[in-house]
Amino acid sequence: MDATLEKSGIYSFSADYSYLSARQDQGAWLPFMPANRLLLHGKYFLPLNNSEQHSAFISFGAQVVGAQNHVAANEKATPGYWLLQGGAGFTFRKVRFLLTGRNLLNTYYYDHLSRLKLYGLRDKGRDLVLNFGWQF
């Protein structure tokens, strides 16, 4: 590996957008259309002296979901929301540790395609996961 990369680290960034708009022949909206969604994700690989034996990274991301007002006759419209996520990971030899979090601000929201929204049940709140693995 190049010595300059080890001192500066490596960045990774991605952005994804999904959009769907469709009507039936009679002009009514199709049922169960997902809301417009923007996913942003970034990762920074920390510079380490001995990259053959271990590696580390931090990651961050956001999920921005628009309101879905184009609904079929028996559907319920849902407001927009955004979720913040982040994580960090470290690998030493063959042992890997990961800590990730989703919906870090504990936003109350309904996913438009959730069947539970009809009963007033919101999607999950803050979600933290600690992962430990051994690679063999």
Image (spheres, grey):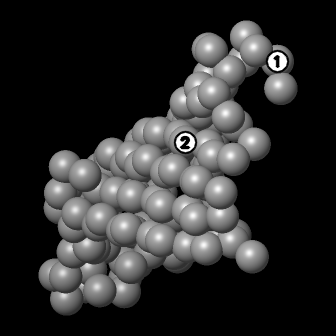
As rendered, which of 57 and 111 lies closer to the eye? Answer: 57
What secondary structure is found at the residue carrying circle 1?
A: loop
Image quadrant of residue 22?
bottom right
Q: Position of residue 49 (x, y in %)?
A: 63, 27
Task: Please say if 126 is above or below 124.
Answer: above
Q: Is residue 37 visible?
A: no
Say whether residue 23 is left or right of residue 1.
Answer: left
Q: Nearer the viewer, residue 106 or 79?
A: 106
User: Residue at left 51%, top 50%?
Assistant: 90
Q: Which residue is mark 1?
A: 2
Q: Which mark is residue 135?
A: none
For label 2, the residue is: 56
Furthest residue to the right?
1
Q: Is residue 74 visible?
A: yes
- Rendering coords of residue 6 (x, y %): 68, 21
- Mark 2 residue element: strand
User: Is 104 placed left or right of 115 in the picture?
Assistant: left
Q: Residue at x 37, y 68 (%)?
A: 130
Q: Residue at x 55, y 62 (%)?
A: 96
Within the image, what quadrant is residue 119 found in? bottom left
* Callout 2 amino acid: Ala
Q: Compared to 13, does 3 lie above or below?
A: above
- The amino acid beneath tag 1 is Asp
Task: Judge the density around disc 1: few (<14), some (14-19), many (≥20) Cα neighbours within 10 Å.
Answer: few
Q: Closer to the camera, 122 or 95?
A: 95
Q: Quadrant of the N terminus?
A: top right
User: Residue 121 in the image: x percent, y percent?
Assistant: 19, 82
Q: Position of residue 97 (x, y in %)?
A: 48, 61
Quarter of the image with the C terminus is: bottom right
